[in-house]
Amino acid sequence: MASLHLNAATTAPSQHTKYPIVTGTSVLGLRYDGGVMVAADTLCSYGSMAKYKDARRIRTVGPATLLGASGEYSDFQSIMDMLEGMEQQNDNFDDGHSTDAQQTHSYLRAVMYQRRSKMNPLWNDLVVAGPNFLGLVDKIGTTYTDNFIATGFGSYLAIPILRKKWRPTMSEGEARGLLEDCLKVLFYRDCRALNRIQIAKVTEEGGAVVSEPYEIETDWSAASFATTKGGLEGDGGW
Amino acid sequence: MHRNMYDTDVTVWSPEGRLLQVEYAMESVKQGSACVGLRSSNYAVIGALKRSVNEMASHQKKIMEIDHHMGVAIAGLTADARSLAKWMRNECLNHKYVYGQPMPSKRLCDDLADKHQRTTQTYVRRPYGVGLLVAAYDEATGPHLFQTCPSGNIYEYYATAIGARSQSAKTYLEKHYETFPESEKDDLIMHALRSLTGCVQGDGELTKENGSIAIVGKDQKFILIENDDLTQYLDRLEVEGGAAEGGDGDAMQE
């Protein structure tokens, strides 16, 4: 009889996140001459449905840090609450110490790794940027820094373009152009992407700034989009 | 036997509005051997007089490294200080793990002061019987010198001294502190030693055995200067003529 009760307790519903619900897709980031730029679209999908078209997935943390998130949007909101709490504490201390991008990156690593170790991850891949810093933290606490970074589908579709086109001496305009090109390709091929995007930059002089959302031009006249199977015969796909 | 009815519990007030157990703990700091601390605009230095219980015993350690950017000099119960130093080292390590950068010294010292304060308000505890001088260098805010007390108070100083006969050192430091900001490493160390000479007991001397100095600062990880490493500075002191001017006779004030 006692074993029946035990069984009831162990079959209680799991409280752990096993899969994300409302998700944002790729975030891109790159270093350029004078700063770091981050870009993402403003779509949050509910499964395959394009549900929220004005979800801001790039935010500023303090004066000179950018945080971009793909994955579960509610987890990102809870991460932002955490970081804003930390910023408020820094202000309250009023002792000249603040949390820069590198520290935020390290802190998020500790949080993400602890959560995954409790089998209850925050379901995000995060891009952290500062005036002279660009790093990634994923949902299991893996970190790296690089000259350019892409999450989600971007790691397949944007990274090859960035590898080819990125230079350390890129101007701000060139950097923005390259990110827009990457997001355009992502919009063409990633079915969870949108042509409404935000671009953000963080520099030593100007701190972190996120643009208002805007639409990028698209051209669907390419043969592979215009005709089924790209005008090719056979059944080998389009 | 009813000398004082209000000193058996930490948390009980005396009618004069005093917490006698806390004051006794403050007294144990004054019994400990002297520690001095001072800083320039780039470095912080702490110095201490070490005691040995008798001629066959080694000298008690007085300065401890907390992290590459921080160290403490202690006056009072050494065992209490060691437990606090262990806690501080742990806090520094945790901060470095989480944020990837050294612990800001002000934050740690404020937490340390809170740790002292809690004991003065909790029935089951006793105050720590130790005062600390914390020397630290932060990348963001430069060098710092803090003093903590068993009462939970914390002060930041340009220069100060604690422990037995420390008034002599304070007098010396007060006389010279305005020149400290521009001082080089070696000048600070010499000031520390000169201020310590007045704190030596009776007709004793400051030697490489009982002297102890540590420095931390810009591009300078915490280092402890003791024994043979101290000799060169003691030699300079001897050349100058030994005891510090303006420091000596004031030891009588205590």
Image: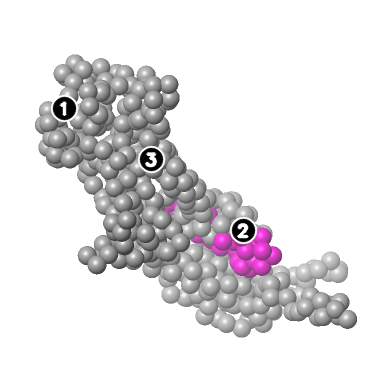
Instruction: Give the mark, 1 or 3, whose residue is nearer the N terminus.
Output: 3
B109 relative to A212, above or below: above
User: What residue type is disc 2 on?
Assistant: Tyr
- The tag on residue B244 is 1
Chain letter of mark 2 equals A
Is the same chain shared between marks 1 and 2?
A: no
- The tag on residue A4 is none
* Closer-to-camera residue (A48/B52): B52
- Mark 2 lies on residue: A113
On the picture, is B226 further left or further right than A149?
Answer: left
Point out the frontmost of discs 2 and 3. 3
Residue A186 part of the magenta-drawn span: no
User: What residue type is disc 3 on?
Assistant: Gly
Callout 2–callout 3 Cβ contact below 8 Å: no
Is the same chain shared between marks 1 and 3?
A: yes
* Closer-to-camera residue (B12/A81): B12
